[in-house]
Image (cartoon, rainbow, N blue to C red):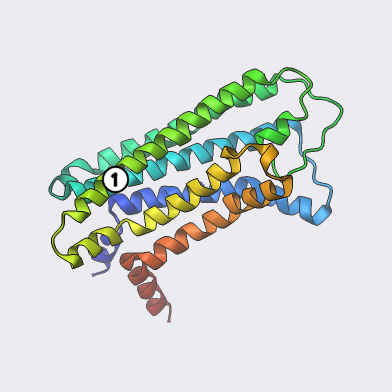
Amino acid sequence: MKVTNVKDLHTPMYFFLSNLSLSDVLLTSNIVPNMLQILWTENGKVTLSGCILQYYIFGSISATECLLLTVMSYDRYQAICNPLKYSSVMTFRCCRGLITFCWAAGFTPTSPVAIGLSKLQFCHLNTIDHFFCDLAPFLELACTDISTVKMVAFSFSFLFTFFPFIFIIVSYACIIHTILRIKSEKGRQKAFSTCTSHLAVVSLYYGTLFILYGVPSKKQSLSINKILSLFYIIVTPLLNPIIYSLKNREISKAFGRILRHAK
């Protein structure tokens, strides 16, 4: 019985979810310790190389999460639109290849931006009015031309956020079309319930991302920018497992079994 319970969670959805959780942990661990030091000492310091490294990890994990959410939408598309072929398409080999692509591709676009930052010359002003090394406040300290770095950063950000988002939108358009064709109301509710957690996480993630980086900085104050960054870096990763746990019967049952055995 225990072996069966474990195998219940060895599906593509939980495989992708475990990687999404890992990316959330890495994103938070990259920024929160230094942020707490700044709040505690009110005099946080970081070297130039350390600041570039923090931005590189932050940008890479963000790109990876966008790709992971895209792959998860593809998994939901196959599960609902092609249920008879799902097991033959979403094999372990396919899932492993998709996850490898997400992590490898996610850490690729931020590399040229980080290299460009390392070649810039910075003025005597060396204080970033932020709790982590985000790109915009970091570039404000530069004394040399930053147009190339900004262009490269924008190009890769557009490539790794906009196109995955379009893919997710198209996937859910097909999913909704398929669900509406189901004759029974119970069948429609059951099919849609398998997507609600992922849809909620996508809305939360991309909503904050677009407001934070899509709205021109001149139209939103620095304090609002900090609050949105805090929400994006801490609150969203905290809510993701809660959303999936509350909306997923298998995870709820697994937690119930763990609590019963603990007693």
**Lateral position of residue 215 relative to residue 250, left or right:** right
**Relative image position of residue 14 (x, y in whole percent):** 34, 54
**Lateral position of residue 134 relative to residue 75, left or right:** right
**131 to 243, vertically: above or below:** above
Are there few (<14), some (14-19), or many (20+) residues within 10 Å of tag 1? few
Q: Quadrant of residue 120?
A: top right
Residue at 62%, 50% (x, y): give it: 228
Q: Identity of the amino acid at label 1?
A: Ala
**Relative image position of residue 88 (x, y in whole percent):** 16, 43
Secondary element under disc 1, as helix, strand or loop, is helix
Residue at 77%, 20% (x, y): give it: 121
- Residue holding disc 1: 173
Q: Quadrant of the N terminus?
A: bottom left
**235 to 215, vertically: above or below:** below
Q: How many marks?
A: 1
Q: Quadrant of residue 145?
A: top right
Q: Is residue 141 visible?
A: yes
Residue at 54%, 48% (x, y): give it: 208
**146 to 19, vertically: above or below:** above
**Relative image position of residue 53 (x, y in whole percent):** 65, 34
